[in-house]
Image (tube, rainbow, N blue to C red):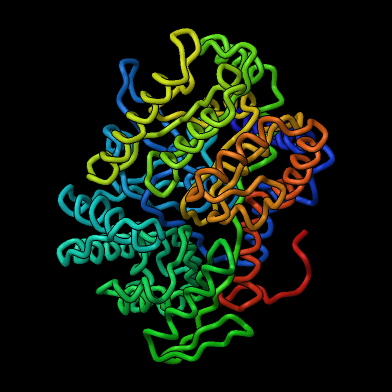
Amino acid sequence: MGTAKTDVAKRVRRALTRMASRQALGSEVSDQTTPDELARAARSYLGSAQIVIASNREPYMHVKAPSGIEVVRSPGGLASALDSVARATGATWIAQGAADADRLVVDEEGKVRVPPGNERYTLKRLWIEPEARELEYRRFCNGCLWPLCHIVYVRPHFVAAQWRAYQEVNEQFAEAILAAIGSKPGLVLLQDYHLGLCASVLRARRPDLSIIMFWHIPWPNREVFRTFPWRRELLEGLLACDLVGFHIQYHANNFLDTVAQELEAQIDHERFAIRRRGRKTFVRTYPISPDAAEISLAASEPWAARAADQIREQLGLGGVKIVLGVDRLDYTKGIPERMVAYKHLLETRPELRGQVSFIQIGVPSRVDLPEYQSLAATVEELAVRLNQRFGTAERPAIHLITRNLGFRDLIPYYVLADVAVVSALHDGMNLVAKEYVAAKVHLDGALVLSPFTGAARELDQAIQASPYDTEALAAAIGRALTMDPAERARRMRSMREVVAGQNIYDWARKILRDARRLHLVPGAPRPGASSR
């Protein structure tokens, strides 16, 4: 009886929190999908099918601390977004275990219930041998597929031993997925480029499975993809899926063009489908968004304003406007280009010196790769030069913060910033842009956005400027800083309507809805009555 009362109390608290979250979005919120609605939709669309999410990164890490074992929510938009989906659907999530206490909390099958204190789904951890992880993840995924798919003029490294490790890890994931599903009907949601071959293994063993791959990074044009030695194998792996999703239509079009060039296949451009060897693969777009209601609620709470004031005081930012950048330290994010543009702005508009400060949050990433080591050194050097030329001991021109910040830590920075700059050289979506918009509940911010992000297709009221054009990017930052308050509010309100109109649960619901509409799940109910 006590457990039942506790569960009811938890559900009531969650419902009240969601209501408050939606109220925080105010008039901008539309008919968004809630977690409970997504859960009902999943059961309606999929029947008894078992849902399995597979990704390289785990949603929660267990780490050793002086006080014992602590649970850390993994950084990054993908992990936090899919965590919301897994909670709503009660899925099994399969990922690599990598933190130093991960093995200490799982059962004999490598499983643990998460999130802590509100257990909603099962996390199954895989233990990849260190040598295989080094070759597959650090070298092949990060040193080959990542630069191959991002047009940023960093040459991919093609090494056969790394490719073999990629194959082996994909096979290991496939075995874990098959074990989790058993003999039940199953829907497998493969996440991102780390698992490009997994569907081939699954299809050979369980032809009846419904397999969906969401490719979160850009898909390059066909001429770039031709340089990849194992291009046919990767394409065959993706075409073993029933559905392949991308953020934007441009990347979906690139994928169709690549298949047409590399394989003998029938391309149906009207239905966006590919038929090869008797199998059909559908290609669709699903722009991903964060949980805007949750972000807006957090930004509306008194603690966020207090924390923002504390940051302003600690950094000596009284009376100045704040420009913010939030990124992993990755060469695709355009951080040096942003800093050079800021330098150009202060050179050409001396009246802004001492009146504006730049906070760049750079989360260390892939620190063992030479390209990332070079980037970190470049960013550090640029920050030093900016402060030497334009800053003072009391008021630096730029504050460089190179550590990981969690969701709650980032909210005050979003609240504080007058301008956010997202200057990615190439990005599938970029959730930071949408998170910033969701946090500006008082409409008191401006967004400068690279046109080479998926988010730029949706947030057309951002000030868009190419990171390759230093003068244009500097002018865009200057315009954002001095924009008329009425125009600033109008633009932000428009962008908030876009972000509020499609949350992470809508993204997942659309994918599951298409799985039903396209008859991809054996034994699932046919399209009929709405689940709302």
Quadrant assignment for the N terminus: top right
Q: Horizontal placement of 161 versus 259: left or right?
A: left
Q: Quadrant of residue 319?
A: top right
Can residue 113 be spotted in the picture?
no
Q: Residue at x 16, y 67 (%)?
A: 160
In the rendered view, would you say 22 is above or below 265? Answer: above
Q: Quadrant of residue 9?
A: top right
In the rendered view, would you say 462 is above or below 390? Answer: below
Q: Foreground residue, 499 or 6?
A: 499
Q: Horizontal placement of 446 versus 388: left or right?
A: right
Quadrant assignment for the C terminus: bottom right
**Residue 237 rendering spot, x and y as whole percentages:** 36, 74
Q: Residue at x 27, y 55 (%)?
A: 143
**Residue 187 rendering spot, x and y as whole percentages:** 50, 66
Q: Foreground residue, 392 or 230?
A: 392
In the rendered view, would you say 234 is above or below 166? Answer: below
Q: Horizontal placement of 179 versus 286: left or right?
A: left
**Residue 438 rendering spot, x and y as whole percentages:** 67, 38
Say how many tags the image has: 0
Q: Residue at x 29, y 32 (%)?
A: 101
